[in-house]
Amino acid sequence: MDARTLPPVFRTALALFNALRCLGFESEQIYFCYNPKQGFLIEVKHDGKEWGIRAGALDMTYEKWQVEWKKVADAMANGEMDQESIDEVWRDFYPHRMRVVEDLLRGGIRIPGRY
């Protein structure tokens, strides 16, 4: 699977997941959520606190999102995502990484390994 062909909101979600993993959060602490009003959300649960960030708007039903995102998640988990395309998605997101750190800290979330 080529990450460059995914909808922009899915690419952003992958980049956010990568940013959170790089900060030391475990995969089990990161949740992907569909919200009909807010769109695609990524939530982190850590030290008894929750924090969320919006990946973007969705133009699909919950059922369609579930099916399409499962394909992406399965491809990532099974090593079927083209690494070059993942790297490109990350490079596109990289300039925005500090916003994630600032939002986490503002939300009272301790970044693993930081303290």
Image: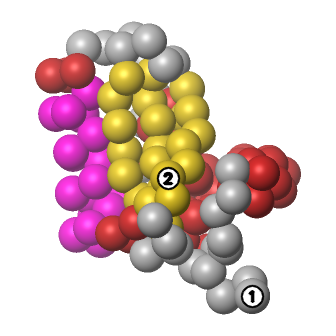
- Location of mark 2 (residue): 50
- Residue at the image point whose x is 28% and y is 40% from the top: 69
- Examine the structure image and report whether residue 12 is included in the region drawn in magenta: no
The vertical placement of 58 against 82, above or below, is above
Q: Real-space Cα distance between discs 1 and 2? A: 19 Å
How many callouts does the rendering have?
A: 2
In x, y percent, where is residue 47?
50, 71
Q: What's the mark number on residue 104?
A: none
| Residue visible at 43% across and 75% down in the picture | 26
Q: Is residue 114 left or right of residue 81?
A: right
Quarter where residue 62 is shown: top left
User: Could you tell me if residue 91 is visible in this image?
Assistant: no
Mark 1 residue type: Tyr
Quarter of the image for residue 68 reads top left
Majority secondary structure of the magenta segment? Answer: helix
Observer-nearest residue: 85 or 36? 36
Question: Which amino acid, mark 2?
Answer: Glu
Residue shown at 75%/88% (left/top)? 115
Q: Secondary structure at mark 2?
A: strand
Q: Is residue 42 depicted above or below 90 in this figure?
A: above
Stretch in magenta: 65-84
Instruction: Where is residue 50? Give x, y as percent.
Output: 50, 53
Residue 101 drawn at (x, y percent): 76, 59
Q: Which mark is residue 115?
A: 1
Q: Secondary structure at mark 1?
A: loop
N-terminal-most mark, 1 or 2: 2
The residue under the point 21% across, 45% down is 71
Instruction: Residue 67: say if magenta.
Output: yes
Report if residue 2 is visible in the image.
yes
Q: Residues within 10 Å of mark 1 (few under 14, many from 20)?
A: few
Mark 2 crowd level (few <14, some 14–19, many ≥20, 10 Å Cα) = some
Q: Is residue 13 above or below residue 35?
A: below
